[in-house]
Image (tube, rainbow, N blue to C red):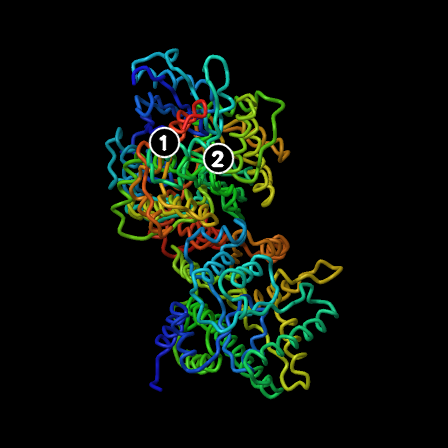
Amino acid sequence: MNEYSSVNKQLDWRRAKVIVAGVDSGAVSSKAVILLDGQPYAFSQVRTRTPKESAFSAINAALAKTHLGLQDIHYIVATGCGRAQVPFTHKTISEIACSAAGAVHIWGPTVRTVLDAGGQSCKVIHCTEKGRVTAFLWNDKCAEGIGRSMEVFADLAKKEVTEIGNIALQSDQFPKISDFCVVYARSEALDLIRSKVPLEQVIAAYHYAMAKRISTLVARLGVKKDFVIIGGLAKNPGIIDWLESILLVSSLAPKPEWDPTLTVTLGAALFADAFYRRQQYNISAPNTAGKP
Amino acid sequence: MMKKGSKAIIEYFRHITENTHEYAKSLQGKGQLLAGYMCTHVPEEILYAAGIIPVRILSSHVSQAMTRSYLHETYCSFSHDCAYQGLQHNYDYLDLLVMSSSCLHMSEAFNVWVRFAGFQQKSFLIPYPHIIQTKPAGGFLVESFGEFKQFIEKFAKKSITDDDLERAIKVYNQNRRLLKRLWEFLRRDNPPITGLEIATVTLASQVMDKQECNQMLEQLIQRLEAEPGKAPSGVRLMLTGGACDDLRIFDLIEHLNYSTNLIFIDSCTAARYFWFEMPEDRPDKLEAIAEGYIGRIPCPAKDNVPGTGEKKRFRFIQQFIEDFKPDGVVFFYQRFCSPQPHDIVALKPILNKLGIPSTELELDTTVPITRFGTQLEALVEIIERVAP
Amino acid sequence: MSKEKILAGLDAGHVNTKVIIMRGQEILGYCTVPTGFDVVAAAQTALNDASDNVGISHGELGGIVATGIFRDMTKVPPLNVTSTVPEYVADAKGALFLNKNSRTVIDIGGNIQKAIRYDQNGNLLDVNQNDKCADGLGIFYTTIAKAIGLSEQEMSELALKSTNNLFIAIQCAVSAESEAIDLMCQGRDIADVADAILRFIVERVADMCTSMSLTKEIVVAGGLAKSQALIKHLSSLMKQDVSALDIPEYVGAIGAVISYEGGK
């Protein structure tokens, strides 16, 4: 997991009317996105140590090259499993709602199903054209840890996690391994190695099993097009291709300007933007105050 | 007895849930015989009629793996926990252990107590039909209960008369009515008691002497009727599912980052335990008892109307939804339970038609607070139509 | 003594490949290399590196005995493996060598755990292996330490400083990892989480031993044996004294050497 930060130097925060931030306090990484008048301005990703510490690291990393201070940000929304620990937020929103909000912003109002295939868990989310969640399904406990197991698997195979997906697609034929849980799948993969099955086929077998597992989750809630995939596994073509062929539904291609792992963070920032504007709206027009 | 406020009475019940053994042994100290029971298919009235206090075996919430040598890995944690407590001799003081054949996991937990925890000579298994919505089931159950009654008479060294049975039926019915009245408070917009508190009281009732329990319930209801309501209700969440005696879950539901109220729990450790009444003043008492147990809200392991695939439980759930008006439903079941998740598959379309969103919690001995908290908050966000 | 053959024991495990070089009773050197799905390459590297450590070449080894789950894959010409021995046998003999009084060894490996009871000559009396759901405890420990940003040693030492008894799911390593992370997200103290992780591992190891009668002295092999916190919790849970063997990762490799040509 790379740590990074970047700023869009073409925007000047001193000219912005609304400066907001979204912070995603995740299990492994913490990310921040800063918007100026709704436009992406700065991003960052840092390793999570403790949620509180890493939320500060993430927002400071995003602010680092900007001369913008935390106190200049009008509204901050935190999401992710560590969101309750982030001290400098105005509101917290679940990553479910943030996924939908971020996805619709990135891919447009045709999005109806979002699969967040992350390191720890997979969630399938149904939303409206405005990015409002109507239903969701969290993976059952036996399907936990698929994304993380892919990293462990890559480590064991002495490959980069970014390359095993492509290796997986190179084999047409490969043995079947357990598609129930990652512990069984990994142990069976080790057995395949022992049976001298070529490494490429073992990698393919593992990917297929994981894709199959995710597909049952998606199928349980149902897929309505347009379908998008976010989270770390969105970058694994081995998983994505197999998932689409099992589900018989294709997903929209990722957008070059948005890393799929930033979708949730962006969603949090979008919420911050909306909440701030509503707050301002209520203050300036008290007679029309109320839920939009 | 000194007049107690509602808080003090609720605290008394809560203390019992955390000190079950201490409470049970105090009953024994007064000369009472105690019979432990797993699952709610055991006819407590027959035990009570013989002067035996039934005490439900509930979880100790201990994270342990040693029972994997006795029960399969993929049995639910509730059954593992019950087995564990037997093997740890936590319940050695019980005079008897009674079980009605119910689901596989709990039946095997019972077997662990019998085979390995020293209950061979002090246990009884009541054959209980699975497909209860058939004509033969009633007759079968009456016969089964008859054999059980004979066993208890021998065990307690006294005969159980019809009067004894009728008395027990009435005490238990009274308990059921009182618990129902307590839960009815949650139909209000601003009830004087929370779902968590009611769940605590209900849990305690499953291990208490019903006569004492009834007295405390009457006092509690009296106090509550005089009290003003708490803050207006937030988002109304109803739980439906399997056995759950973990108050931390109910506490989490009422302490999310949003204003929420737990307004009903359809589970065998809550409403399904008491939401029925046994026919009273019938000439054949065993028939009355059998009728009561068969007619109540069924456990999913026993709910299968032959030939139609219909689930009787769903009618009750729909009635609860109508009466208690939840904004959202939380399904919960023990990880590795089979019957509960099967019901969810069929229940979801009903909820979808009613426009009620839901989420599912898989229970274990530990509670992953951020995961469950996120699921529940996401459910509230759907209900509140949270969008950017 | 110097006329005795220099022998190598090669333990080709699921996660790590271990080599130890001995002359008679004397341990000359050792080395661990990640197996990484390429058993032969890992074995080659481990043999070369261990030999380098000792100051000899691979070719100067008088004999190489392989054990471990992947041992059959090491019987290829470049490695010059003389013979193989099953891991249960190697574990028993290795444990006995390191502790003459031991009669039970609990080997917590990268992917598999085993409990092995043996007599004073290292002959097997009883063996047991973990349930399938308890696979991967070793890998889990390495991964979670990395995720938290600590070395395995740091995590073990931190666990000793725990002041709160937290619990995580014991169903399997995946659930445990999820819940350990859940605890971190709740803002819990890392020392307490580290301790909960070790107690989870100990629960699964101990449950493997429940259906076996263990004979004293009970010793622990495998990398995780180096964790004081683990040994402490294991003793407490099993209500028996257990102790860690020296260089516990090399128990199998040592046993392999001792099994050379059926030697004691």
Residue C133, horizontal then vertical, whole percent = 50, 43
Residue A270, horizontal then vertical, whole percent = 40, 41
Q: Which chain carries label 1?
A: C
Instruction: Say if B25 sits above or below A140 in the image.
Output: below
Instruction: List the single residue furthest toward the bottom.
Output: B163
- Residue ID for mark 1: C249
Instruction: Say if A108 sits above or below C182 in the image.
Output: above
Q: Is mark 2 on a helix, strand or loop?
A: strand
Using the image as rendered, state which of residue A223 and residue A210 is in the foreground: A210
Tag on residue A230? 2
Q: Which amino acid does label 1 sit on?
A: Glu
Asked where in the image residue C201 lies, by quadrant, the reply is top left
Q: What residue type is labelled 2?
A: Ile
Q: Residue sitting at 67 percent across and 66 percent down?
A: B129
Q: Is mark 1 on a helix, strand or loop?
A: helix
User: Image quadrant for the N terminus of chain A?
Assistant: top left
Residue A284, horizontal then vertical, whole percent = 34, 51
Number of residues whose C-alpha sits closer than 10 Å to that of mark 1, classed few (under 14), some (14–19) or many (20 or more): many
How far separated are the C-alphas under marks 2 and 1?
Answer: 40 Å
Using the image as rendered, state which of residue B91 and residue A82 is in the foreground: B91
- Count of number-bearing discs: 2
Relative placement, left or right, of C115 versus B333 is: left
Tag on residue B388? none
Number of residues whose C-alpha sits closer than 10 Å to that of mark 2, classed few (under 14), some (14–19) or many (20 or more): many
Nearest-to-viewer mark from 2 and 1? 1
| Residue under disc 2 on the same chain as residue under disc 1 | no
Tell me if residue B81 can be seen. Answer: yes
Relative placement, left or right, of B60 versus B354 is: left
